[in-house]
């Protein structure tokens, strides 16, 4: 068996259960519309970090963080009842910044592409201006 495969499987199972619990059984209004992106479980299965994203601003993010902290004991008990493990891992919720970083990188790449196209258009326009309209050739030819 490949090393690290069990923590990955356990993490995916915990992610599925947490997603169901958060959508159906946790009725805290502080928890907004969140998406669990992944759950990373330590190799000894003692700690599970659940990464999430949400729609909203910084205030919504803070409220969701507080609500998840309040719901953590309930969620951990439910995970223990639903998944057979010797010891239920400690749950920690962390905001997943990789989505924001991905969007920022995508914006940068789009800006670079637009800048490149602008430069190419300017170069084409300069060549068209320097060409002799009678012969269709540049000024340097005699």
Image (cartoon, rainbow, N blue to C red):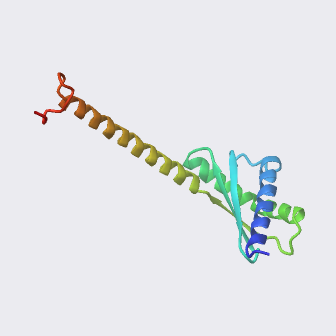
Q: Position of residue 21 (x, y in %)?
A: 81, 53
38 or 82, which lies in front?
38
Q: Determine the residue positioned at 58% across, 52% down.
A: 99
Q: Determine the residue positioned at 31% across, 40% down.
A: 119
Q: Extreme left residue here? A: 142
Could you tell me which quadrant the N terminus lies in? bottom right
**How many numbered discs sit on the rendered protein?**
0
Q: Relative to residue 102, is residue 10 drawn left or right?
A: right
60 or 34, which lies in front?
34
Q: Relative to residue 137, is residue 15 drawn left or right?
A: right
8 or 120, which lies in front?
120
Q: Determine the residue positioned at 65% across, 56% down.
A: 65
Q: Position of residue 4 (x, y in %)?
A: 73, 73
Could you tell me which quadrant the C terminus lies in? top left
110 or 99, which lies in front?
110
Tell me if residue 39 comes above or below residue 102 in the rendering: below
Tell me if residue 127 comes above or below residue 66 in the rendering: above
- In which image quadrant can residue 122 be found? top left
Q: Determine the residue positioned at 23% across, 34% down.
A: 127
Q: Relative to residue 20, is residue 95 drawn left or right?
A: left
- In which image quadrant can residue 47 be found? bottom right
Q: Extreme front residue here? A: 142
Q: Position of residue 117 (x, y in %)?
A: 37, 39
- In which image quadrant can residue 81 be found? bottom right
């Amino acid at each position: 068996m490949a090393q690290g495969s069990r923590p990955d499987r356990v993490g995916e199972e915990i992610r599925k259960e947490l997603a169901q619990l958060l959508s159906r059984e946790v009725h805290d209004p502080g928890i907004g519309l969140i998406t669990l992106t992944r759950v990373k479980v330590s190799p000894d299965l003692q700690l599970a970090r659940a990464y999430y994203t949400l729609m909203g601003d910084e205030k919504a993010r803070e409220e969701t963080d507080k609500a998840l902290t309040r719901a953590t004991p309930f969620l951990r008990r439910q995970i223990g009842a639903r998944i057979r493990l010797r010891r239920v891992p400690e749950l920690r919720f962390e905001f997943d910044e990789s989505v924001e970083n991905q969007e920022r990188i995508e914006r940068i790449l789009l800006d670079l592409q637009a800048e490149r196209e602008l430069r190419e258009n300017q170069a084409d326009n300069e060549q068209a201006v320097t060409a002799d309209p009678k012969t269709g050739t540049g000024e340097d030819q005699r």
